Amino acid sequence: AAGVIQSPRHLIKEKRETATLKCYPIPRHDTVYWYQQGPGQDPQFLISFYEKMQSDKGSIPDRFSAQQFSDYHSELNMSSLELGDSALYFCATPSKGNTEAFFGQGTRLTVV
Amino acid sequence: GQQLNQSPQSMFIQEGEDVSMNCTSSSIFNTWLWYKQDPGEGPVLLIALYKAGELTSNGRLTAQFGITRKDSFLNISASIPSDVGIYFCAGQGNTDKLIFGTGTRLQVFP
């Protein structure tokens, strides 16, 4: 069965650059969650979308923005990158009943 | 905000031993989920719990949703080397987003 696809898998950027992370949810699933996981940390919720509208917001910096498109894929845009933005970024799609979440393999962002 | 305390933080066991880890919360959750994460990979769902008191098994894994809805435990029986990884509990309250526990790092020695 198709899973959550994220791209790229790895990304290296310099400070103050911008980055765009992409997430393709499980087909026909209309909800996407974004999480950030720092080294040795648990995943922290950033933002979520339902039917192309922002549904919830967590600890997402103002330098970050995200959107969900008509095909339900989502993009996380990160500007003015800082060293502390280096982390694994996951997107997840809930099951149809919104009772479980299935994660992509993540994008490892390294800011140098 | 809601927080999940997970313990132990790390476990070093021998192959064949049983493992137990738990999560506690200051808030009530409607759903408890247990995930396993390998280095550099996304969390993989192991077990989902939906009702207080529910006890669910998945092979060598058993998890329970606490009666108070503020805690959950995960047991792994007869551990094997491929059980190595980080285990996270996650709770879901009145919103869809998941709140993760702090993780338990499991190391299994042959």
Image: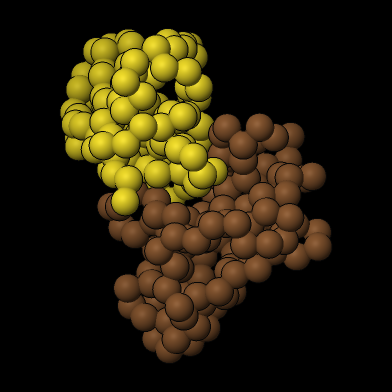
Question: Residue B29 is drawn in which quadrant?
Answer: top left
- As rendered, which of A57 and B14 lies closer to the eye? A57
Q: Quadrant of residue A100?
A: top right
Of residue B49 and residue B13, the one placed in the foreground of this image is B49
Q: Quadrant of the N terminus of chain A?
A: top right
Q: Give the colour chain A carries in the figure.
A: brown
Residue B79 appearing in the image: no
Identify the colour of chain B in the image. Answer: yellow
Q: How far across and how far down the image is residue B106, in percent?
A: 27, 31
Would you say A59 lies left or right of A17 here? left
Q: Is residue B61 left or right of residue A72?
A: left
Residue drawn at (81%, 62%) of the image: A70
Q: Please state the total of marks drawn on the protein image.
A: 0
Residue B105, x across and y down, in percent: 27, 37
Q: Nearer the viewer, residue B22 or A49?
A: A49
A108 in relation to A101, above or below: below
Residue at 40 percent across and 37 percent down: it is B90
The colour style of the image is by chain
Answer above or below: position of A30 versus B46. below
* Relative to B92, B26 lies left or right: left
The residue that appears at 36% across and 80% down in the rendered structure is A82
Q: Tell me if I can see residue B33 in this picture.
A: yes
Residue drawn at (39%, 86%), measured in percent from left and top? Answer: A15
> x, y (%) of residue B32?
43, 29
Rendered location of residue A85, percent (x, y) = 38, 72
**Quadrant in the picture for the C terminus of chain A:** bottom left
